[in-house]
């Protein structure tokens, strides 16, 4: 957040094999395993349904109406990365389209997460290059002002350091700090372990009230049943 | 709206066979038949397209960030119900996911209508458990504070009493008070009766201006045609 | 914007064969070819994905909650037109449904663009009558107050004169003034000409930094690479 | 919510002397005394700061862009009333200005609460006729469609029955059902009783942690202090 | 809307003495006299209350995050002008502060109307240089991209031609096309003529129902009075 | 962002005498001196006009509808601090009122900056305890869930570390990292140095075009003057 005109070349990425494990759990589980933090705001939506992606963050800080740094970011992409784009003030322009997607994909990027607009969504959908964005907009941008690449950014309310794990699916986007990926995978695994059993019970008609033993707590809190 | 910590067990539900008839007309027609009232705000959107549901309301009043009462509501569900969840202040958290959906479905619920967020939407879509919500969010909730079940609630701007008929489709969600379901079915039937004929005329190129005899009214109102 | 209660019958439409050429480029390219102006606000979304439409504008100015003039507009439609509906103040009601769509389609309209709500979206989707709107709403309207047809309107932030070219796809809606269609087609063609080549290069891993020769400019602007 | 074209003439108003007592506590305290329910959404703001009002609700249901029923409501006003205006769908038009305010004031109304726009705010401020509204807008309305007066309405997310107590100040607007006014005054009084003492302690530097004996609960919940 | 990089030097301004007359009526009356059109969206608010301004429009079209053209616009200002600034896509940055205000004021500008942010509002308030804006923001802008001056613009939903009359007060901002100023002054005068009489009647307790003779119309529309 | 249930007791605060110098420049200048970053989103508004405050950040991370940690934060306040409150998901409840303000003030806090609602604004205004908030809301909160104190937080889009400098005035709120305060004061001083001279020139009618020597750049960019 505190450097402009800077590109950090050497970043420490989260272990991609762990990130992949985390991504398999999906956003809701990863976010719970994190302790219910790290989620981007719910206005971040995928341009097509069904994509489920994990990767390591290459961050880019842009200015309203200016996508120059996107091209700078492209060079920093390594296979397995997800580009996370923040704007220095709210903007709904379309900073990204099919040409940049072709470039990002060629470099190995798995997705784009951008707190702004995206365009050429039909082509991006055909390419299966997933984007989570604030909106869709054909509004073009200029290339006139420096931002930064691989500095910490705030994207859709979430702090992202370069190299952090990004998990995104139909439920949204969650950021897991690189140093916490291992413990989060562990916590997510533990969480998932007995989900199948729970699901089976609930499907059989057992109530959460009983399965989670909530009745006593509710009564103690003063819940009254009336006719 | 005026009781907290209360679960009403015996509610008078609208006649489900009538509710089913109403649901077959869809939201737009049911809403017109009601006299253009009872509609929830248009930000209430289905998590997947194509669902068309009718049911009787089990209402639940929750607090921001707390889904404890969802489990209490589950026990009150009877086959044919639609759970209607209101929050005591605006909140976009994800109060509902696939485990609760499994439970609700097992109890016979047909859908959830919630003035907040929902998560696990991919799984919910696969389960074909429809949800109309304000947004999608993976943000988890706690279980700490009492709300109420089966009290009158305001959900997305509409007043819902327990037992009221809920109709929801791609156009949104409408509430029909239990005591007005019969007359609304009747009005909707009357409305639909000559729609096929109208549609055929319009498809043949007849103008609404002529079919509805609007020309005189427009002229009287002062409409001028110029070149 | 300055006449109420008026219907202009004779409007000069953009050359439809040129409009069709422009539509084939899509919204993003047409908008760039225009000089990055003329785009409607990004909240204008299609009711179903994949539609790509071009046409000549028949404009209609409505009042909040009143769709009377839609029927007046229907009579002014000629094959190849797109109806562009503006509301004199913000309104989310559903001004348009399947009956009007049947009528518009019978008259030769290719689409509706409306800065308000639309309903019967399931049927409209089945009919393949595309609509770009601010929202979906079943809220019905009355027929009580005069607006105008074929006057200049501001729709979703864009000025539209009757007869202007409208291009709409998954990226949004752009307006091209009738007198600028020819030059815009030309500019779009020029723009597209070398896109295939660029795309091939980018797909092969060439960076935009090199392809667009940006490195010098960035360095001159002060960009620093650090480790 | 379920009757259009109806004016209820005889409504049971909350005891005005109790409402006045409640208003003296202000909105925050009344809302807490109610059990944290009954509050309108926070977008409802006063047109000038400093007004603190209590009164009994005369309700009016209007349609988007149409203020006809405001004149019908005027006749139902008795001294001590607050007019509560709901719109059947979201609308930001200016339904109310200085002429209506003159009329309402002459009838004894103390304020207007409207889930839409208001105009002539400079004059209203000079008249000291307070209005809580969604916005300020000069947009005029028509007089063409029937709504209702003194039916239950949902205004800015809160259910209001005719005769309910309305309390409004710089913190917003709260609704207290007529039958709960007495107990709410009592609860508010109890709440206020030891506020002075609490305030003195806090002003002297005593921490809420100690005054409210929170330390044990926090520790039990797992709070950790680190350096 | 259709020219970029252009400054029109010779524009035809509305007669300032007529604009002053119109401004004296205020926005609500001017807007009604126009036929309820020409109003900017209600999110346009003054930075301080009480200002009431009329002037002739100098228009400027800016790009997101770039205020270069503001300086170009300054040179085109003549005494009596109001600068109207539109942005080619939604932006909340602070395009204008006390230095530009000093310059605009020195050139004779009476106010700024901007569909974006403004800063230094404390100083602007002390200078009594009124601004109507979408928001207040300290976010600075760059000077890199050409827009235009004195071309038609859409500002906050309203079409403004250079030279049009702008009236702004606490109720918002209205645009009156230069060629319609005279007739609007006339219509506004007629409208105001009997307002004093009406106000006196209403203040005396006469109902609008009677004064405007609405009872018959309401009855005919089906209004029912019940107990 | 990555620790819950934690209170950091020893934080390194920015030098308060430097923070005071920075605050004297105001938000717009401090933000420019920072390189146009660090600004909170423009929806953060003061509850009363005219306050201009600088201080060192004590941060608190709260959950929707739960203000328990505010009391924990109170103990960490030292004279000269500004409390910065972030919520783990969007919430408009009133987390703060006159009792907490009394406590914060007694501890030496200069202001509160909160990405949520505040209540008792009349009393806070009388106390002259300034608050910058997203909204005003009387909605009360519970005390049930742990958050954290003095961890890095994202507040209204800006990253805040405990001890950072906060400057707030009528233009909004800016965050300056503790380690950058000195250089920012310097840059702000340099910026201000010739403002008086510039202002005098502009007031005398000199154009920014000439003072900033923009004419050449504009011409080079292609600006055309036409009649």
Image: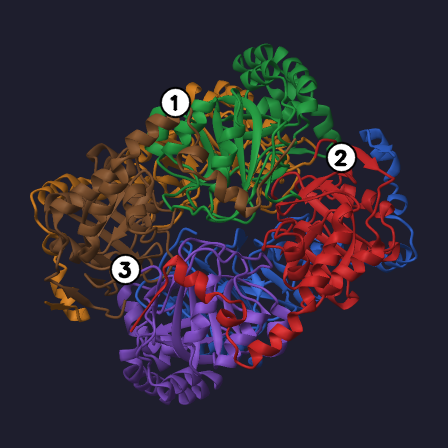
Chain colours: A brown, B green, C orange, D red, E blue, F purple
Q: Is residue F129 visible?
A: no
Chain bearing tag 1 is A
Q: Which image quarter: residue F5? A: bottom left
Q: Nearer the viewer, residue F213 or A215?
A: A215
Under circle 2, the secondary element is loop
Q: Whole-Å distance between the Cαs marked 2 and 1?
A: 51 Å
Chain bearing tag 2 is D
Q: Are marks 2 and 1 in contact (CB under 8 Å)?
A: no
Residue with the mark numbered 3: A62
Q: Whole-Å distance between the Cαs marked 2 and 3?
A: 52 Å
Q: Whole-Å distance between the Cαs marked 1 and 3?
A: 52 Å
Tell which circle, 1 or 3, labels the residue nearer the N-terminal end: 3
Q: Is residue A64 visible?
A: yes
Crowd band around label 1 with a 10 angstrom C-alpha radius: few (<14), some (14–19), many (20+): few
Residue with the mark numbered 2: D146
Instruction: Give the number of callouts.
Output: 3
Where residue A46 sits: x, y (%)? 31, 40
Image position of A69 (left or right of B210): left
Image position of F43 (left or right of A125): right
Image position of C189 (left or right of C82): left
Task: Report the residue at 71% width, 31% height from top.
Answer: D2
Residue with the mark numbered 1: A204
Of circles 1 and 3, the one toward us is: 1
Q: Which image quarter: residue B102? A: top left
Q: Which image quarter: residue D79? A: bottom right
Where residue A179 sits: x, y (%)? 18, 57
């Amino acid at each position: 957040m505190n450097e402009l005109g800077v590109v950090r070349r050497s970043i420490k990425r989260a272990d991609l094999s762990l990130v992949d494990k985390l991504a398999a759990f999906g956003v809701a589980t990863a976010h719970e395993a994190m302790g219910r933090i790290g989620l981007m705001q719910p206005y971040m939506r995928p341009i097509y349904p069904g994509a489920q992606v994990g990767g390591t963050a290459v961050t880019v800080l842009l200015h309203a109406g200016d996508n120059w740094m996107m091209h700078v970011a492209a060079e920093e992409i390594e296979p397995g990365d997800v580009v996370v784009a923040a704007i220095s003030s709210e903007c709904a322009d379309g900073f990204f389209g099919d040409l940049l997607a072709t470039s990002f994909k060629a470099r190995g990027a798995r997705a784009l997460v951008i707190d702004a607009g995206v365009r050429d969504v039909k082509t991006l959908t055909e390419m299966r290059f997933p984007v989570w964005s604030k909106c869709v907009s054909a509004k073009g941008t200029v290339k006139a002002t420096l931002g930064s690449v691989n500095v910490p950014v705030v994207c859709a309310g979430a702090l992202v350091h370069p190299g952090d794990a990004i998990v995104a699916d139909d439920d949204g986007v969650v950021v897991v700090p690189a140093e916490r990926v291992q413990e989060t995978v562990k916590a997510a695994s533990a969480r998932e372990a007995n989900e199948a059993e729970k699901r089976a019970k609930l499907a059989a008609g057992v109530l959460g009230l009983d399965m989670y033993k909530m009745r006593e707590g509710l009564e103690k809190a003063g819940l009254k049943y009336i006719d």
